[in-house]
Image (cartoon, helix red, strand yellow):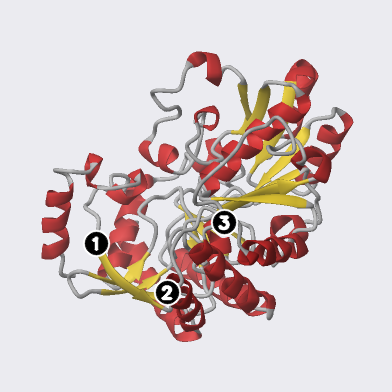
Amino acid sequence: MRNAISKKLFAEAQKYIPGGVNSPVRAFKSVGGEPIFIKRAKGCYIYDVDGNKFIDYVLSWGPMIIGHANPKVTKMIKNAISKGTSYGAPTALEVRFAKMLNEAFPSMELLRLVSSGTEAAMSALRLARGFTNRDKILKFEGCYHGHADSLLVRAGSGLATMGVPDSAGVPDDLAKHTLTVPYNDLDAVKKAVAEHGKDMACIIIEPVAANMGVIPPKEGFLEGLRKVTAENNILLIFDEVITGFRLAYGGAQEYYNIKPDLTCLGKIIGGGLPIGAYGGRRDIMEKISPLGAVYQAGTLSGNPVAVTAGIETLKLLKKGVYKELEKKSAYLAEGIKGVAKKAGISTCHTRVGSILCTFFTPNNVIDYASAKTSDTKAYAKFFFAMLEKGINLAPSQFEAMFLSTAHTEREIERTIKIAYDAFKTAV
């Protein structure tokens, strides 16, 4: 694999950008190498500056569910750009888009567009505290909800990758209001609620944990959360930045038939452009300014270019892509599991819909602690063996693989074939 230009660019980037990257996991530190610099992408492929071509299973960390540079979406984006890129004022587009989101997620009776999943989660927490007049929140170890101060306590994703459970710069006085318990441990939740429930504004969760690898909820876990929050007047927030429009058109709450009080959505709703949304029960959302006392604002909220991309993406998803995505994902997951076994390596394989993961551990992975038993050095060997043969995976054991409608049986079969040889390098 050629990488001379990427190496040169990385050296130059480090002069001006912390660590040479604009998001930590891109630095490849978890796998012990240097990042590749991407030039363009199309369908299920990405192309780097050195002329290498890769089957892409990162998909911009999930949102490119209909593939990169979908011609219908890019056509509409170009049309929108010709009319201006930002107005800072209401548009008919955002009304149409909000209606589409509401139809997909009926629990979002009112919703507000923002510019990222991080902003959505941050705003939802502020709203939960403002609505309940309580300060404490409960999150789950290894779950990641963006880099807002309140949420960088035993977070996952980039922090799990870097082995840093908490971030410097988060005041102790703020962090003390964030309680953490193991994912999938309903008894721990009940204990925390029994002790702190009167001061607890909300419980926020990735309904399928996808930032410490992919960890499905145990049977009855989400139902148990819904019951305990309802009984104690605590708001239940589903962070569906990853699962929204990916597990089903109505996200994890449709997939598992659970109705949260508030929902956070991310860049998938804009076809990968910078956008997010949060919404929920009308009585809660009416506490937001200008109707209520909870303040949240943003010049780029409802950006016309991102909203245009979102409308076109949702139109394509609504046509019914999930049955075929499920079929492809099952085929890939079973294929990878089979060649891992054939190669004689102990792994744990998880999948929910088109989100999947291979943990390099013989243990059953059910939470952050069991995910951390993974052999990250073995994963690094596997990662580079795959990359060398043209398969782009996340440069971290604690991330997910994503499929798109653009992946075909040909790419999936090639991936499985290459994975067999890559697993043998990791033994």
Label 2: which secondary element? loop
Task: For residue 298, say whether it is visible.
Answer: yes
- Mark 2 vs mark 3: give the one in front: 2
Q: Is 82 on the left or on the right of 349, as rendered?
A: left
| Residue designated by label 1 | 37
Q: Which mark is residue 81?
A: none
**Crowd around label 1: few <14 · some 14–19 · many ≥20 (10 Å):** some
Label 3: which secondary element? loop
Q: Is 424 on the left or on the right of 63, as rendered?
A: left
**Nearest the eye: 46 or 190:** 46
Q: Give the tally of numbered discs.
A: 3
At label 2, the amino acid type is Ser
**Crowd around label 2: few <14 · some 14–19 · many ≥20 (10 Å):** few
Question: Distance between the Cα atoms at labels 2 and 3?
Answer: 17 Å
**Nearest the eye: 27 or 117:** 117
Circles 2, 3 touching at the beta carbon (< 8 Å): no
The residue located at (58%, 67%) in the rendering is: 354
Residue 411, quarter of the rendered image? bottom left
**Crowd around label 3: few <14 · some 14–19 · many ≥20 (10 Å):** many
- Mark 1 vs mark 3: give the one in front: 3
Provide residue 144's location: percent of width, then percent of height: 53, 41
**Nearest the eye: 180 or 409:** 180
Residue 82, quarter of the rendered image? bottom left
| Residue designated by label 3 | 302
| Residue designated by label 2 | 82
Provide residue 145's location: percent of width, then percent of height: 55, 41
